[in-house]
Image (tube, helix red, strand yellow):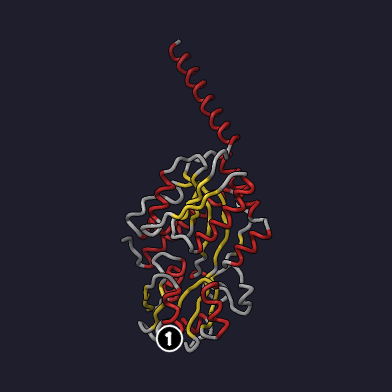
Amino acid sequence: MKVVRGLLFFAAALSLAWGSMAGAAADYPSRPITLVVPFPAGGSPDAYARIMAEGMAERLGTPLVVEARPGAGSSLGTQHVARSQADGYTLMLATLSFVTSPLLYSSAKWDAAGDFDGIAEIATAPSVAVVPAAFPANTLQEFVDYAKKHPGEVNYLMPGRGTSMHLNSELLRLVADLDMVAVPYQGVPPGLPDLMSGRLSMTMSPMSLVGPHIKTGALKALAVAAPQRLKELPDIPTFAEAGFSDAEVVSWYTIVAPAGTPRDVVAKLNRAANDTLQDPKVVQKLVNIGGIVSKPKSPQEVDNLLASEAKRWHELFPKMNIKAE
């Protein structure tokens, strides 16, 4: 009899718990939501977050407050979100560094695939491989051929360890077996004068930063790291078209939540994000900052992206001789 009563009590408690969770999901959201950006305010991640927050707030009927939490790369903000209550009121704007930082920094204590739930994919952000106007190469293959003939003499602007631009350059070095030197800068803009003067040989950069210099002829575009050619550079091939598909790194922007967020809440957030991405005004804003707006994806598809990207870089970093600090 004690066993039966215990089972009945457990079943009743479980029923109440599920009922409470369902009720919370039905009432969600009942207060403002925080969208954490683990980078300084004013950068590209902040811009993507603010555009999405405005559109999602309109559809959810509650404010989405964008909160910059930079520090230790992206570790401080990311670990704050990982420790936050999984109730749908704390979200995060996640980029490629979300899956690479745990492999690069011993202080990055999170599992991208295990500690977070995917909400939505916003956009991908293509990079362009550019060289100075005087550099003796007009295609990516010609750049590779030149670098092979001049080992150790070719360098590249490295705008931050673990950025998509850094990893794209290093992956090209690995795939093409180049002896190419990284020259670190605090972002792309500080290194552009050295690139245009010829003191640097190459960089990967967002189109928004190098587009004006390509137009003036100060820089030459060799290839774009993107699924398709850019409308701004219709004659410039993708990495795949240039014969270097294995060296392509496409940066992406997603929204994630702490693992264990109720599935009904995740579904509401996913719908709000995907509906926002169907708004022509939002699309234009994202295009204006260099994004290629993603097709609507389910939370599971976002989870799959995070897991596959984490696996990819876990396998590649040892081959690239990139170690954690």
Q: How many marks?
A: 1
Residue 213: image x %, image y %?
53, 81
Quadrant showing the N terminus: top left
Residue 193: image x %, image y %?
44, 81
Query: Horizontal placement of 152 versus 123: left or right?
Result: left
Q: Which residue is mark 1?
A: 198
Q: Quadrant of residue 74?
A: bottom left
Classify mark 1: residues with Cα within 10 Å, few (<14), some (14-19) or many (20+): some
Secondary structure beneath label 1: loop
Residue 85: image x %, image y %?
45, 40
Of residues 315 and 293, the one drawn nearer to the viewer in this rendering: 293
Q: Is residue 185 above or below residue 325?
A: below
Query: Horizontal placement of 322 versus 298: left or right?
Result: left
Q: Quadrant of residue 314?
A: bottom left
Name the residue: 43% across, 86% down: 198
Residue 309 appears anywhere in the view: yes
Of residues 220 and 191, the one drawn nearer to the viewer in this rendering: 191
Name the residue: 65% across, 51% down: 275
Name the residue: 58% across, 76% down: 237
Quadrant showing the C terminus: bottom left
Residue 175 appears anywhere in the view: no
Q: Is residue 313 above or below residue 218?
A: above
Please, which residue is most extreme toward the top here?
1
**Disc 1 residue type (three-letter):** Gly
Q: Is residue 28 above or below residue 286?
A: above
Name the residue: 55% across, 86% down: 217
Residue 158: image x %, image y %?
40, 72
